[in-house]
Each structure stands twice: as structure tokens, then as C-alpha cells.
Image (tube, rainbow, N blue to C red):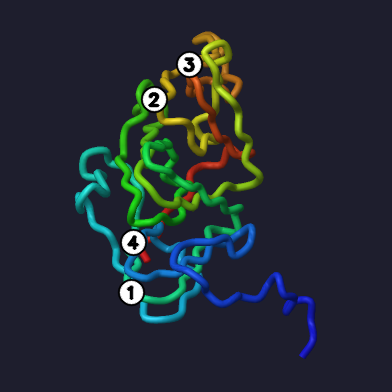
Amino acid sequence: MHSDLFASENMVQPATAPGMVLQNAKAVKYVVNGECYARQGSMIAFRGNLQFEKQGQGVGNFLKRAVTGEGLALMAVRGQGEAWFAHEAANCFIIDFAQGDTLTVNGRNVLCFDPGLRYEIKVVKGAGMVGGGLFNSVFSGQGRLAVFCEGQPIVIPVSPQAPVLVDTDAVVGWSAQLQTSLHRSQSVGSMIRGGSGEAVQLRLDGDGFVIVRPSETTAPKTTSG
């Protein structure tokens, strides 16, 4: 049988070491030897002796959804084997954390991560329920985190001289040390007359960067499977 479908770039290669790698631009392969964590419903294939267990609220340092009403629906993947994760053919990226690194990530963009990473769900300062209830996950520790982005992400430097304002529906993540606040770019009178559709943004001040996606679609729903 012959087809471009069977080109070498589409074929799975033998695993060489535990952990995650990009299978391609749209999927992450994770060689599990113990456990890892992934968003519920993101597994597209696996082989080996693996078990998938839904993570409940308040387990260890994980979900704080009972307090915030929001969060990241996770599953634990345990055993020995290989699993592939993806979300609606979005672009995937792997971030390496060294000790001391901290990154704020929108929970809707988290795909999977190493057990050596820890995170805490926090209400974004200045953008609570007024800003649409923006709850982000602050990751720290040592290990790798895979995120996805609808389209090619845009990384914008932030400096004390040049704060950046972003649409809360487009933001993927930012340097955890940045200060956040809510910014209104539309007058009350304009809002009464129908508005521009760009009434409120998240303002980021300090020294770091912010990642945005080229889309303002609403956050994808997580599944329970």
C-alpha cells in the first residue's frame, strides 16, 4: 500500500525516554513511566498499560474549583505506556521550566504537564467577575508543560515603559511577575449606544511578556471523559 499518508513525518517513532515531545504541530506524545496530568478529554490514542483517572476537587495542590467556581478539569494518567494528547487540531507547544521559573497560563490552554510541576488557580487581580471571571493557573517547579493555541501565538514584550493591554478572550498566558489590572477603553456613553465590542481589556505592567492567540472565540468546554 502506498500513500503520502505513510510519509515518515506521520509515523510514530519508538520511544527513547519518558516524558513529552511534540508528535507534530498539533499533538503531543507523552511516554508515561509513573504518572502525568492532562486536561480531561484530550487523549486521542494510547498504547501500553495506562489508566486515566479524573482528578476531583481539592486533591493535593490541584483544583480549587470549589472556591473559585472555575478551574482546569484534569485527569491523572498512570502506568507505563505512550499517550497522545491534542485539542481540536490547535497548535501545540512545550514549555521547559527550570527551578524558579513561574508562568501564568489560562487554564483553557493547558494540555498536559509533568508531575514535577505544581500550579495554583488564582483569580486574576483586577479582572475577577467584572472581567468575565478570569481564573488562571500559576505554574512553577521543574518539568515540562504542554499548551495549545488556536492559530499561531503572538508573544509581546512588556516593559515598565510599555505596558500591554490584551483582550481577555485572546490571552494565553504571561510572566507571573507582571501586575494586572482592568482597563476600560470605552466611555459609558459609547457603551449605552451599543459599544465597539472592545470595552474592557486586561492591562499588564512590569517586565516580562504576554502570549495571545489570534482569536477571540470563547473558551473551549472541557469534557468529563
- Secondary structure at badge 1 equals strand
**Which numbered disc, 4 or 1, marks the residue closer to the eye?**
1
- The residue labelled by disc 4 is 75
At 59% from the left and 54% from the top, the residue drawn is 90
Check disc 4 and report its element: helix, strand or loop: strand
- Of the pair 150 and 217, the residue shown nearer to us: 150
Q: Nearer the viewer, mark 2 or mark 4?
A: 4
Sequence-first disc among 3 and 4: 4
Q: Amino acid at mark 1?
A: Gly
> From mark 1 to mark 3, how far is it between C-alphas?
47 Å
Q: Along the polypeptide, which appears first: circle 1 or circle 3? A: 1
Cα distance in 3D space between marks 2 and 4: 28 Å
Callouts 1 and 3 close, C-beta under 8 Å: no
Q: Secondary structure at mark 2?
A: loop
Q: Residues within 10 Å of mark 3 (few under 14, many from 20)?
A: some
Question: Badge 2 is on which residue?
Answer: 127
Which circle marks residue 79 in the picture?
1
